[in-house]
Amino acid sequence: MNDILIRIEGRCGRVTLNRPAALNALSEPMCVALDAALVAWAADAAVDLVVIDAAGDRAFCAGGDIAKLYAAGMAGNYAHGQAFWHKEYRMNLRIADYPKPVVSLMQGFTMGGGVGVGCHAGHRIVGESSQIAMPECGIGLVPDVGGSYLLAHAPGYLGEYLASTGTRMGPADAIYAGFADVFVPEPDWPALITALVAEGTGALARFVAPAPEGVLAAQQGQIDAHFCGESLGDALRSLRGDSGAFALGALKALRRVSPLAACAAVEMLHRLGDSPALPDALELEYRYTFRAQEKGDFLEGIRAAVIDKDRKPKWLHKSIETVAAAEVAAMLLPLGAQAWTVEG
């Protein structure tokens, strides 16, 4: 299929996301094709490594193809989204556990589903234009595709901050937060890919350079002070007592997100703890995404952001403080026979 280019060059499996006009949004067929290639190459002695990149300069992958999820959900077909997420999460885990080196090159926007493809690779490369984020709470979903796993491993309470506000990370901040490994200037990427194909991952070291300075490390103390509470409501109250620029910016971001999703995102990180396993994170994420269309703010979030583009979502709750703990717990209840599993 033209939306994803899959081929072998030398001893390298090459994957290029090829929907630049759609910011390389990940569709279900693209997800299935990528997963099938990974399965085949894992057993192919002629393939030594995998390199994943994307066409265009605006985005590696700005997320999933949520317009199709919206259409199906509005028709009452919740199973479409549930099946897509089930397949996607298995692909995310396959990348993380892959028996051969996987290299991802993430230019421009890398968000949501793009994080699931690029940020579980063993060698994660960012450049000058990289903007990495988990902005799902802004459309009524929670950070998924293993994003909660990455956020739970971030320093201090940075995960709670990034999950609830959807803050974008430049290259240095993505490295600091654990979403990327190294910075390579983007003009050098074609030569780097050529070297990777010819030599393997040993070629990477000579292309690495210092990343432009980020902001998160300097903000870590404020993040920890405000987001260390038991709930997102505690963070909100702490931020309101601070008139500084960071607190005001965080409050502005929290006013835009789905209260239910943001509260659930923070609760998920607390449940996962400091050292979660990726399968456990994916299973917990699926509990929310499985219910998000029918019982959450997901369809309304897509309507406001993507379909009507009025940027005025009518969330189920007027504020974070009106979300009851029992409502969050209900969205995260085990799914029993419908639970996400590594196989099947």
Image (tube, rainbow, N blue to C red):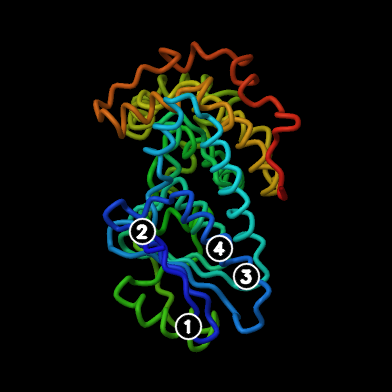
What distance separates the C-alpha of mark 3 from that of mark 1? Answer: 15 Å
Q: Is residue 76 left or right of residue 62?
A: right
Residue 263, numbered label: none
Would you say the residues marked 2 and 3 are in contact, meaning their CB atoms lie under 8 Å apart? no
Residue that carries the numbered disc 3 in the rendered image: 40
Label 2 to label 4: alpha-carbon separation: 23 Å
Label number found at residue 121: 4
Task: Determine the CA span between mark 4 and mark 3.
Answer: 17 Å
Return the residue at label 2.
213
In what element is the residue under mark 2?
loop
Residue 9 numbered mark, or none:
1
Label 1: element kind:
strand
Mark 4 surroundings within 10 Å by alpha-carbon count, few (fewer than 14), some (14 through 19), many (20 or more): many
Residue appearing at x 52%, y 14% in the figure: 323
State the image coordinates of residue 308 (x, y, percent, origin top left): 26, 28
State the residue lying farthest toward the right. 336
CB under 8 Å between discs 3 and 1: no
The mark closer to the camera, 2 or 4, is 4
Q: Earlier in the sequence, mark 3 or mark 1?
A: 1
In space, the residues marked 1 and 2 are separated at their CA atoms by 35 Å
Disc 3 element: helix
Q: Quadrant of residue 74?
A: top left
For the residue pair 29 and 174, the one nearer the viewer reads as 29
Residue 97 versus residue 187 in the image, above or below: above
Q: Estimate the spatial distance between the alpha carbons at disc 4 and disc 1, rounded to whole Å.
A: 19 Å
- Three-letter code for the amino acid on which mark 1 is drawn: Glu
Q: Foreground residue, 257 or 177?
A: 257
Instruction: Give the left or right position of residue 201, taking residue 236 as reference.
Output: right
